[in-house]
Image: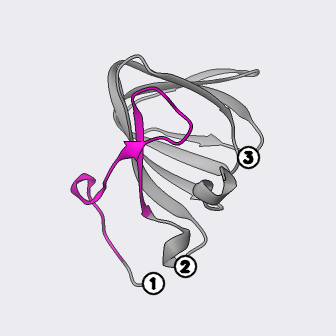
């Protein structure tokens, strides 16, 4: 794989698998490209919430808006420029605030095969 640069305009967002809310993801690099990680963008409409047990290690970088991520241990909120790490096996609830959120993410290993 060669070095590549991406912008929001490069991504085709689709509804997050298994979710009924207005939460969308779009992989830019994944298992189809031969690397060990998945890289993409995500969009959360205002007031959305999802709960899941992490199938992979996941890093979310908030680019716009705000998210709150809750576990049994507590809640963290993140805004533009902040990064949240969610380890594999952790059960999390991710909530978007009234302005929604636009994020970038990196997972290891690839999240799509882990959800199959």
Camera-nearest residue between 109 and 78: 109
How busy is the neighbourhood of tag 3: few (under 14 within 10 Å), some, or many (20 plus)?
some
Going from N to C along the chain, the mark reached first, 2 or 1, is 1
How busy is the neighbourhood of tag 1: few (under 14 within 10 Å), some, or many (20 plus)?
few
Find the distance from the CA under tag 2 to the CA under tag 1. 7 Å
**Residue 79 visible to an observer of this rendering:** yes
In the rendered view, would you say 17 is above or below 106? above
Q: Residue at x 47, y 59 (%)?
A: 39
Q: Where is residue 27, by image quadrant? A: bottom left
Q: Name the residue under label 2.
A: 34
Drawn side of residue 112 relative to residue 48, left or right: right
Of labels 2 and 1, the one closer to you: 2
Q: Where is residue 82, by image quadrant? A: top left
Going from N to C along the chain, the mark reached first, 2 or 3, is 2
Q: Mark 3 points at which residue?
A: 88
Drawn side of residue 91 relative to residue 38, left or right: right
Dots 2, 1 in contact, CB < 8 A: yes
Camera-nearest residue between 23 and 73: 23
x and y percent of residue 100 in the render? 34, 25
Q: Which residue is drawn at 56% across and 37% down?
A: 18
Q: Which quadrant is the N terminus positioned in?
A: bottom left
Q: Which residue is drawn at 44% across and 21% down?
A: 48
Going from N to C along the chain, the mark reached first, 3 or 1, is 1
Drawn side of residue 59 relative to residue 55, left or right: left
x and y percent of residue 37 in the render? 57, 65
In the rendered view, would you say 88 is above or below 82? below
Question: What is the magenta range?
Answer: 4-28
Q: Name the residue under label 1.
A: 1
Q: Does the magenta stretch include residue 67?
A: no
């Amino acid at each position: 794989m060669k070095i590549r640069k991406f912008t929001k305009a490069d991504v085709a967002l689709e509804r997050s698998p298994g979710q009924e809310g207005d939460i969308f993801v779009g992989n830019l690099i994944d298992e189809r490209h031969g690397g060990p990680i998945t890289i993409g963008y995500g969009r959360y409409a205002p007031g959305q919430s999802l709960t899941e047990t992490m199938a992979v290690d996941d890093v979310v970088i908030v680019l716009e808006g705000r998210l709150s991520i809750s576990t049994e241990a507590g809640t963290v909120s993140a805004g533009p420029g902040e990064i949240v790490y969610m380890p594999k096996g952790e059960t999390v609830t991710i909530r978007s605030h009234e302005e929604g959120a636009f994020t970038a993410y990196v997972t290891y290993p690839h999240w799509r095969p882990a959800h199959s």
